[in-house]
Image (spheres, grey):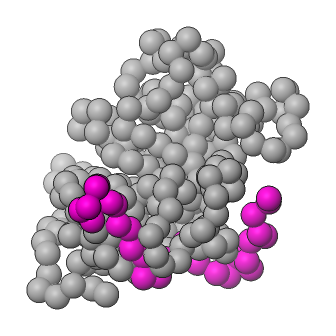
Amino acid sequence: MAPPQSAPATAPVLEIHDLTKVYRMGEVEVHALKGINLSVEQGEFVAIMGPSGSGKSTLMNIIGCLDRPTAGTYRLDGIDVSRLDRDQRAEIRNDKIGFVFQSFNLLARTRATENVELPLLYGNLGLTAPERAKRSREALARVGLAGREDHYPSQLSGGQQQRVAIARALVTDPAILLADEPTGNLDSRTSEEVIGIFQGLNDAGKTVILITHEPDIAAHARRVVYVRDGLIWRDERIVQVRAKHPDAAAEGPEPAVAFPFTIAPPEEVVR
């Protein structure tokens, strides 16, 4: 059965209300999420943070349509996906979400352009082979890999492999880019380059949701949602400012930097 049509474009791209998730292990119940409320507008860049066991991975799995909540509602791009079956969730997942993972998840014996094409093969877009190849090359160019379309993963650096993964996530023009620790396997310099790509995509209007445990990575987002014990403890807007580098000429341009911040649990839980 096909999923319902999207709601008008004015609706938030993501709406979660009173979301709970309970895992049953024999006679023991584990309450991973205890009533999450979250709304993300089109074009936001949101980082979701939390320690191990906080519930952020469970929340990510539900946002990514990889799992269903026990109770509550979740609307993605206007579609209520809370109770869709596995096949319906798979269809929504392929159409609406672009995934970027820590481990890249590229096919080792497949060229970059073919790795990027994979979501187009699984979808119902009805594209011809030349059309798929064109989209793939355009997505690779968008992340700075024009000219490397025929390279295999083993011929690319870690940062370049993650760029291929981002291009693969972009190729279907999803409603949301969902990135799970995308810099976890990268050094600090390469991490900055990859996060810069997400910032550029967000500046161009793409909605980005980033799962991370690193405050310096979350500082590149425009909003940080802190999850702890299955609840949202803090939801902060991050002010992006421009600061002059000490070595920069007085008349020179000022590079954009994120305002330093520290995330700590507040005194009250945000309901």
- In reply to whether residue 6 is colored magenta, the answer given is yes
User: Seen in the image, is 98 located left or right of residue 24?
Assistant: right
Q: Position of residue 130 (x, y in %)?
A: 85, 27
- In reply to whether residue 212 is colored magenta, the answer given is no
- Image quarter hosting the N terminus: bottom right
Q: Residue 260 sits in which quadrant?
A: bottom left
User: Seen in the image, is 151 located left or right of residue 215?
Assistant: right
Q: Residue 53 sits in which quadrant?
A: bottom left
Q: Nearer the viewer, residue 148 or 128?
A: 128
Q: Residue at x 78, y 32 (%)?
A: 132
Specify whether residue 28 is in view.
Answer: yes
User: Seen in the image, is 221 located left or right of residue 52?
Assistant: right
Q: Residue at x 35, y 80 (%)?
A: 35
Q: How many numbered callouts?
A: 0
Q: Which residues are magenta?
A: 1-30
User: Seen in the image, is 130 located left or right of residue 235?
Assistant: right
Specify whether residue 138 is in view.
Answer: no
Residue found at the very far front of the displayed protein: 27
